[in-house]
Amino acid sequence: QYSHNGKVTARYIIQPKAPPHSSSTCRVLCLVYINFCFATLHSSLLSPVISQALELLELRILCNQNRTGIPSPKYQPTHTHKLTMRKILVPIKRVIDYAQKIRVDPSKGAQGVQLKNVKMSMNPFCEIAVEEAIQLKEQNKGAEVVAISVGPKQCTETIRTALAMGADRGIHIETKPDVRGDYIDLQPWAIASLLKGVVEKEDAVDLVLLGKQSIDSDCGQTGPLLAGLLNAPQATFAANIERGDDGSFTVERETDTGTETIKLNASGKPAVITCDLRLNTPRYPTMPNIMKAKKKPVETISLEDMVKELGLDLDEVLTPKNEVVEVYEPPPRKEGETVGSIDELLGKLKEKGLVA
């Protein structure tokens, strides 16, 4: 309280907004400093210097009515503390390039899709996730983007593509050449279990961005499974992502009837968001960035070592939860016919029994 000529003219309640890691000594020193300021200056003459000090100390002054009935001046901080984003993990998958014609050998049963001598590239939805992570990094200086891939040795090339786009480093969980990731051997539950271990191994992960699905298996299960294993907030089919100052994420997501907007509150667990097609347009890596990507660090760990480190069972990870019984090419489309008029078109449709 502040006294003038022996009378109490103003009373202040000072509440430190100290972060959880601040020591009690720091809070006491803050209060002593503020008490000193109020003892030497009248509240109505509070200097801008002290106001700035209060703001930097992140203190909130709750002023009540003084005993003379004159309202005490209220301190209104102009600075709002913004939680900085620390780390974004982006799992990416190596698949057959979307422009390639898929070749199927029916004699090989479930492994009929031919992977040899076929151009492979990053899953298109994973590219969208990488682009969104980089854009969030550009908006939040100091954030780190880590690309993760599970697959054979060639997955390093896919990780390098993400690094050339702007990711900071990569993690490659390397599998043996005969382990297929197109739903034959490694399925979403196994991938999600491995990713859970990576998230827990890394420090200060705020967000995990994934493609909504891969174009080889079209499962769309890895993101939701990962969120379930982490007990973390999730949003799927994201068409727009905005991060709040409090660490929350507002996501506009695609639905069958349009879009809906949901908010993922900060919970101490990383948010898990899967990215849809409308979210952004991935950038093309420039030649200088491609050269820089060759020098960025990529940590490689074998699947066997990773499973052992996480306390998982290798046989359980490699045993599919679902069995692919058969793989076959879609039947060829019949050649169309050209008609010369609407009447002729209606006649053809009636002939085939498509219209009455």
Image (tube, grey):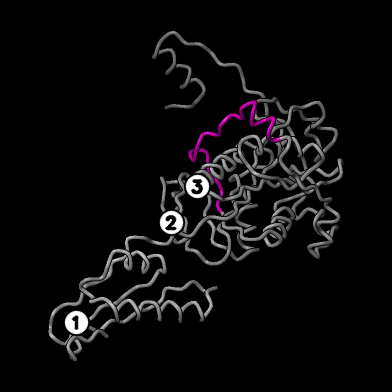
Which one is nearer the viewer's eye here, 351 or 213? 213
Q: Is residue 266 above or below residue 16?
A: above
User: Which residue does the numbered mark 3 point to in the structure image?
Assistant: 238
Residue at the farthest bottom position: 6
Crowd rating for badge 1 (residues with CA inside 10 Å; few <14, some 14–19, many 20+): some
Q: List the single residue furthest toward the top.
A: 340
Instruction: Provide the residue span drawn in magenta.
Output: 273-293
The amino acid pointed to by label 1 is Gln
Front position among marks 2 and 3: 2
- The residue lying at 52 percent from left, 66 percent from top is 267
- Left or right, 51 with respect to 31, comes to left
- The residue to which callout 2 is attached is 244
* Tag nearer the camera, 1 or 2: 1
Is residue 79 positioned above or below 13 on the image? above
Question: Distance between the Cα atoms at labels 2 and 3?
Answer: 16 Å
Q: Residues within 10 Å of mark 3 (few under 14, many from 20)?
A: many
